[in-house]
Image (tube, rainbow, N blue to C red):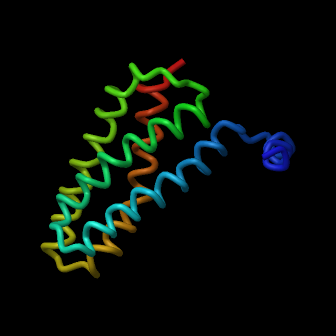
Amino acid sequence: MIIIEKICEKFNISYRFVKFLLVGVLNTLFGYGVFAFFNFLGLHYSLSTLLATILGILFNFKTTGCLVFKNNDNKLLFRFLFVYGLTYLLTVIILGLFEKVNLVNMYLNYAILLPFNALISYFLMKKFVFKS
């Protein structure tokens, strides 16, 4: 991590933002893995997404709070729930639209949404969950 910190200093990039991105990759892999697992088991995409979101919230809350924002305040979990509840609703709505137009398959459809979800989540976390 020291190397990443030095690179951030050299290019005048926020180290916290880079940590958020790296933790976000970890959280995304976890969430997608949970979604894929439940989808593979034959669950409907909305239920797979719900389970991935619930388990992801708990995992993400600790990793993002502790590793990125150095904040271990469990009172913020309700704000996290709001952010991921909103993200869940948007994801299910868009996946439903993808299903209606028969876009690729559910695995790829979900993967297509990951960057969109990451941007929405970062903005909401920064403004509502871990605001200074």
Q: Which residue shows up at 83% across the image and 44% down it?
A: 2
Residue 114 position by quadrant:
bottom left
Residue 61 position by quadrant:
top left
**Residue 8 percent coordinates (x, y):** 79, 44
Q: Quadrant of the C terminus?
A: top right
Count of numbered labels shown in the rendering = 0
Could you say which is closer to the camera, residue 28 or residue 105? 28
Residue 80 position by quadrant:
top left
Could you say which is closer to the camera, residue 113 or residue 78? 78
- Residue 62 lies, with reference to residue 50, above or below; the image says above
Q: Which residue shows up at 16% across the image and 76% down it?
A: 101
Residue placed farthest to the left in the image?
100
Q: Which residue shows up at 32% across the image and 63% down it?
A: 35
**Residue 56 percent coordinates (x, y):** 38, 48
Could you say which is closer to the camera, residue 51 or residue 81? 51
Residue placed farthest to the front in the image?
41
Q: Which residue shows up at 78% across the image and 46% down it?
A: 1
**Residue 130 percent coordinates (x, y):** 49, 25
**Residue 9 percent coordinates (x, y):** 83, 40
